[in-house]
Structures are given as structure tokens and as C-alpha cells.
Image (cartoon, helix red, strand yellow):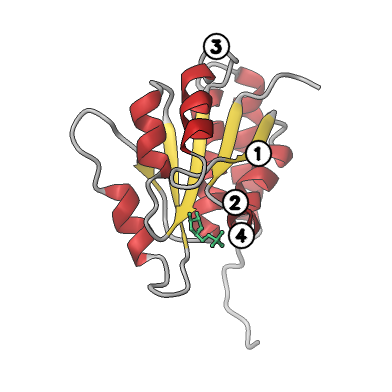
Amino acid sequence: MPEPQVGIIMGSQSDWATMKEAATLLETLEVPYEARIVSAHRTPDRLWDYGRTAVARGLKVIVAGAGGAAHLPGMMASKTRLPVIGVPVESRALRGVDSLYSIVQMPRGFPVATMAIGAAGAANAGLMAAGILALGDPALAERLERWREELSAAIPEVPQDE
Ligand code: RP5
């Protein structure tokens, strides 16, 4: 197995249903990744170790998803210089608006590239990670171009009755 280039992290097992959209995209584009549960609140030491060792382990991009008081992406951005892409997971109580606000409004100096709430955001996080890696990987750039062309070609021009 090639070394993972993308680390997909999430605050809870319950986030995986959303975050696997990012994993699926990375698999389709043949980008090696790892997926881990790393909670800012429940496993802070695990978060710290993950951020501290991420560069040395060869990761290039981190995709971080969490819901509710979603501090994971921001805390990870404080711990590593790697680009962090945040995914606000849809929460039950506030439908993910809490997650979005927790992730998006970072203080100057520690950015998190924040995606849309939920599954579309997770899928886009996978694509964004692939886009970053494609800057230095022509074969991946080619696969990403093809994926985009196929998506465009699959969109009908004329709407049908459903
Ligand atoms: C957050 O709390 C997680 O990211 C998850 O979205 C949310 C709920 O977690 P569980 O109670 O389902 O474990 O930390």
C-alpha cells in the first residue's frame, strides 16, 4: 500500500457516514488516504499527536470533519502547517449551522478551507484535496480532469418529468 497523502479525520464514528464521501472520491481518483477518529474534545492527546507528526509522516493535506461544537479542523490547523479542509457535519439539533460557524470563522493566521455542510461538503473536500495534490502530480491532474469532464457529460441539457 502506498503511504497516505491525505488524512481524513473526524470527531466521531457517527461522522463516518458523511466523511466517507471524501474517501470515496479519493479512491476514485487513486489518491492514497487514511481515515481516523480524532476528537478535539474526547481525545485531545490523539489530536495533538496527529497534528505534531502529520508532516513527518508524509501527509500533504488534512480533511477534518466534525459536528456541533466542531473544533477539530481549527485545532488541527493550529497544530500543523498542512492545508486543512474543514467539513461541517450536519448536527441533529441545529442541522449543521453550528458546525459551519464553529469551523469557518477562524482567526487570522490559522486558516481552514471550509466546505458546505454535509455530504456534498465532504465530497468536495475530497476533490479539493485531490486538486491541491494535482498541482504537483500530472497523472493525478489528468485523472481529475477526466473525472470533471465525465461529470459535465452526465448532466442532461433538457429536463425530464420524474
Ligand atoms: C462531534 O460531536 C462529532 O464530530 C459528531 O459530529 C458530534 C456527535 O458525536 P457523537 O455523539 O455521535 O459521537 O464531536
Q: Could you tell me if the residues under marks 4 and 2 are in contact, i.e. CB atoms within 8 Å?
A: no
Identify the mark nearer the N-term, 2 or 1.
2
Q: Is residue 27 left or right of residue 80?
A: right
Q: Amino acid at mark 3?
A: Ala
Q: Is residue 87 left or right of residue 114?
A: right
Q: Which mark is residue 56?
A: 3
Identify the mark nearer the N-term, 3 or 1.
1
The kind of secondary structure element at disc 1 is strand
Q: Amino acid at mark 2?
A: Met
Compute the Cα span from label 2 to label 1. 9 Å
Q: Is residue 100 visible?
A: yes
Between 119 and 162, the one lying in front of the other is 119
Q: Could you tell me if the residues under marks 2 and 1 are in contact, i.e. CB atoms within 8 Å?
A: yes
The quadrant in which the C terminus is found is bottom right
Query: Is 58 rendered above or below residue 13?
Result: above
- Count residues near mark 3 (Cα–Cα under 10 Å), then give few for <14, some for 14-19, many for 20+: few
Which residue is denoted by mark 2 in the rendering?
A: 19
Compute the Cα span from label 3 to label 1. 17 Å
Extreme-top residue of the structure: 56
Identify the mark nearer the N-term, 4 or 2.
4
From the Cβ of disc 4, is ligand 1 less than 8 Å away? yes
The kind of secondary structure element at disc 2 is helix
Compute the Cα span from label 4 to label 1. 13 Å
Q: Is residue 128 visible?
A: no
Return the x and y of residue 101 as percentages of the image width and height: 29, 57
